[in-house]
Image: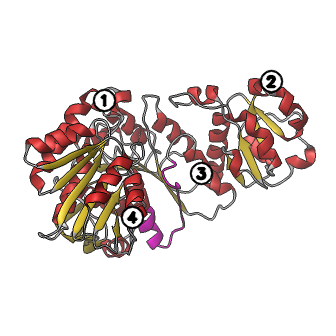
Amino acid sequence: MKLREATEKMAGRSPHLDPALAESDVTRFVIDSREAGAGSVFFALSQPEYANNGFNGDFADSTEYVPAALAAGATAAVVRDERFTEHSGALEGLKGQLIFSDDVIASLQSLAHQVYREWNRPVVAITGSAGKTTAKELTAHVLSAAGLRVLRNKKNYNNGLGHPLTVLELAADRSFQMAVLEMGMSTPLNEIERLCRITPPDVSVVLNVMPVHIEYLGTIEGIAAAKAEIVEGMKEGGTAVLNADDERVAAMAALSKGHVITFGIANEADIRAEEIEFSGFGNTQFKLITPAGEAQVAFPLNGKHNVMNALAAAAVGHIFGMGPADIAGAFATVSAPGQRGEIIEYKAGFRVINDSYNSNPDALVSMAETLVAGSRPEERKIVVAGEMLELGTGAVEMHRDAGQRIGPLGVDVLIGVRGLAEHIVAGAELVGIKNARFAADSEAAGEMLAEMITAGDVVLVKGSRGVKTERVIEKLDERFERS
């Protein structure tokens, strides 16, 4: 793409742009000046853009990094008009490489939308209170097994910045045949609606509605309404893929502009899992039932929540013409995304399930069930459970309830990590876990675990990036060697 074309697509203004530069090729678009280089355009974000585009909080003004980005080889930078005025001393001599915008984030998103329109191939959009990234990876894996070249978000780039940056990978490579994109939200500011305007989904997948981000959304109904934007924002004649076991998600069928396909375990659904058996870590079997037939699945991920993620992916595969045997074959070769149920073996003779990316009460209990079911009777079962964030006014009760639900499962040791996790400990003690402890932070929890762990132990580390429970694993790695 020529810089001139990019400027037009983002509705930018370039009165001083060097004419020769306008005809140069640009293939990368960055918001971090440290990632700038040849062929890139640096978008200098500032607080007004964040406030105008559904981001909570105070953010740094990156206009000051424009000179560094250009010095690193960026072809041009996009700046907000009044920010240029404020930084004119540093930027005046660089006007030949500047594109001006009323709203830099809006320009980034407009550019992504125009690139998407020219590409014009199917988009699968996935949302849910939990499991988005795993479901996205499973879905992309299934479709790739069908021979399709699939664009997907890196990591969890699922917001108003990560989403357009993912789409803009198409500027350098338009050979992708399909996109699988997760869409996240954490505020009542119509974040998913905004993402759908960038890439209207052909298929909209809703995994679940849970009390995550409830402190910002206020009620579980508010969360459901925010998630439903992905169904409301899909194309006419598209397909909504909905969790039949979640009544709030199932009710979104009324919003569909086209077809509806359901998935589930407990309730009647188009795509179902039956005869689920869990015979050890990394070894789940179930019968996949689809409108096109059945197939036996050997699935390397654990937990009911991951079976549900697999069913969502299977539904998308079915929509795009894959048979149950092909879908089952794809599932056999998946692996857990980093920090989402990965199994770590240590030479000292213990095992750790690292599920440190995110947490909520249902997922915590599900993974504790997985820990117990996958362990031998003689193995000591240890749960390290981080504080769960953004649960709103009911957070104390939700933490205590999670501890009470874990208590009867057969867990031998529970370590609660930080803040409200003391109520997980209290709940577990109420129902009989004698060895329940509290650690002030993840480093303290890691030290505590490293002191007690021994051969034959099986450990679940379940938490979130906000609580930094990955540091528990880091503390183990300081003392013990992995197999």
Instruction: Give the quarter of the image for residue 330.
Output: bottom left
Badge 1: residue crowd in 10 Å (few <14, some 14–19, many ≥20): some
Q: Viewed as shown, does residue 212 lie left or right of 69?
A: left
* Sequence-earlier tag: 2 or 1: 2
Q: Label 2 belongs to which residue? A: 85
The image position of residue 450, as x and y in percent, is: 32, 59
Instruction: Give the quarter of the image for residue 219.
Output: top left
* Sequence-earlier tag: 3 or 1: 3
Q: Secondary structure at mark 1?
A: helix
Q: Label 4 belongs to which residue? A: 479
Residue 281 vertical position relative to residue 160 in the rendered view, above or below: below
Measure the C-alpha gap from mark 1 to mark 4: 37 Å
Measure the C-alpha gap from mark 4 to mark 3: 42 Å
Frontmost of labels 4 and 3 is 4
Q: Label 3 belongs to which residue? A: 167
Frontmost of labels 4 and 2 is 4
What amino acid type should be assigned to the residue bearing mark 1?
Gly
Q: Which residues are magenta?
A: 140-157
